[in-house]
Image (cartoon, rainbow, N blue to C red):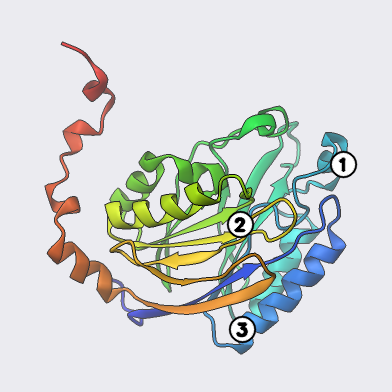
Amino acid sequence: MDKRNATLKIALAQMTVTHGEVAPNLATICRMTAEAAQAGAQIVCFPELAQCGFYMKKETLHALAEPIEGPFVTKLQALAAEHHIHLLCGYAEAPTGEEALYNSCVLIDDEGKILENMRKIYLWGREKQRFTPGHRLPVVNTKLGRIGILNCYDAEYPETFRIEALKGAELILVGANWSFTGQSRWELQLSCNALCNLLFVAGVNIADQYCCGHSRVVAPDGRVIETVHNEETVLITTIDFAEIEEQRAKIPYMTDFNPETFTMDALKTY
């Protein structure tokens, strides 16, 4: 474990999004970041596409998308530095000089430096007509700990969690735009994958007429530490990384894991 405090205070900003606009969402992000910092959180996490939402015409989405060096992410960098807090936030990314559009989330440290830009890998339904899939499952070695990132539907595949766990993740952050009809899956996926990989999982969702909220932080034994319902709020909780080693000493999933079963060769029939 890196030389840092064993505990981490996390803020999950479960926000209501104005779909098809940026300015009101940015105002909410600024307000909730300030609230999280005032409460002593070391990192504040916003949902998938917190910048602009999802429910809009394709043309509107393309018009609102920005490159990572654009004004939205630049404002997030200034916001993180101003409040001395790490920040994770979803946005529609249109890289300069490319036609592709990505459903991305950016991780920024408390000095305003971009640490990672994760592009959603698994695209749900009509997302396939709007976005290009990403291909990386990053784990970032931050001053807060080793943090993995997933984006909504990415969390419905156990392989994504396991890959990030094998890369050394201690905490996996999941930003989401998760529907009411899928609420039971949201709750199960976060808890099951925290348990199966014996690490912390924090999922932050939008709360509006489309999305079910229920953001939560889950411990390495699958226990829900803290959760909220379907209201706009900042959930703040503290996790203790020592619990990972404690649970892995009790439950041998990771030490007994056979990597030979986690290859393409394992799919062969003989």
Mark 3 and mark 2 residues within 8 Å of each other at the beta carbon? no
Amino acid at pointer 2:
Val
The mark nearer the N terminus, 1 or 2, is: 1
Amino acid at pointer 3:
Ala
Q: Position of residue 59 (x, y in %)?
A: 87, 36
Nearer the viewer's eye, disc 1 or disc 2?
1
Q: Position of residue 74 (x, y in %)?
A: 74, 63
Nearer the viewer's eye, disc 3 or disc 2?
3
Check disc 3 and report its element: helix, strand or loop: helix
Quadrant, the N terminus? bottom left
Q: Could you say which is closer to the camera, residue 136 or residue 189?
A: 189
Separation of residues labelled 1 and 2 (CA atoms): 21 Å
Q: Which label number is shown at residue 60?
A: 1
Amino acid at pointer 1:
Thr
Q: Residue tagged by mark 3? A: 37
Answer few, some or many: residues within 10 Å of disc 1's Cα (few below 14, many 20 plus, some between 14 and 19): some
The mark nearer the N terminus, 3 or 2, is: 3
Check disc 2 and report its element: helix, strand or loop: strand
Quadrant housing residue 163 = top left
Separation of residues labelled 3 and 1 (CA atoms): 32 Å
Q: Residue 104 vs residue 157: left or right?
A: right
